[in-house]
Image (cartoon, rainbow, N blue to C red):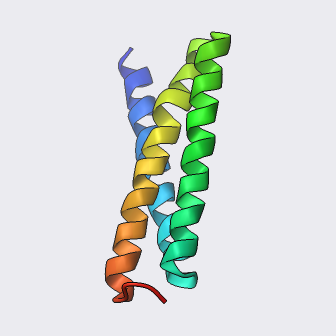
Amino acid sequence: MTSNVTILFAFMAAAFSVGVYVFFRLCLRRTLRSAGLGWLICATIVLALGWTAFALDLPPRTAVFTGLILPVWLIGGLLGLLIGLIRGGRADK
């Protein structure tokens, strides 16, 4: 079981890091409003996927992906937006 937990944490760390990077770059290239709207659209998709996986009673690996990995990616994206906002030094462009 230890190797499975290690792999899970590695996937979670990778998802978080990718979320931070993607939304950080998006925030630097676009306006805050546009980047925030992109994050909200991604949040809606993540919630819809999680609800669908629960409603269809999909296998455990799918449930872990939609219920744990994708939300961690989304939280990383929110952190990336905040860092992009602070580093960009602007309220709105």
Quarter occupied by residue 85: bottom left
Q: Is residue 16 above or below residue 36?
A: above
Instruction: Determine whether, in the image, residue 15 is placed left or right of residue 42.
Output: left
Residue 66 drawn at (x, y percent) = 56, 30
For image coordinates 49% across by 89% down, the residue present is 93
Residue 61 found in image quarter: top right
**Image quadrant where one finds the N terminus:** top left
Residue 66 visible (yes or no)? yes
The quarter of the picture where residue 26 lies is: bottom right
Q: Is residue 51 above or below residue 31?
A: above
- Give percent across and percent down for residue 12: 43, 40
| 54 or 68: nearer the viewer | 54
- Above or below residue 79? Residue 45 is above
> Looking at the picture, how far across and down is residue 81, in whole percent?
42, 68
Residue at left offset 50%, top offset 28%: 67
Residue 59 relative to residue 22: left or right: right
Please tell me which residue lies in front, 68 or 2: 68
User: Residue drawn 39% across and 86% down?
Assistant: 88
Can you see residue 58? no
Q: Residue at x 48, y 47 (%)?
A: 73
Residue 15 position (above or below residue 50): below
**Total count of labels:** 0
**Coordinates of residue 89 in the picture (x, y in percent):** 34, 89
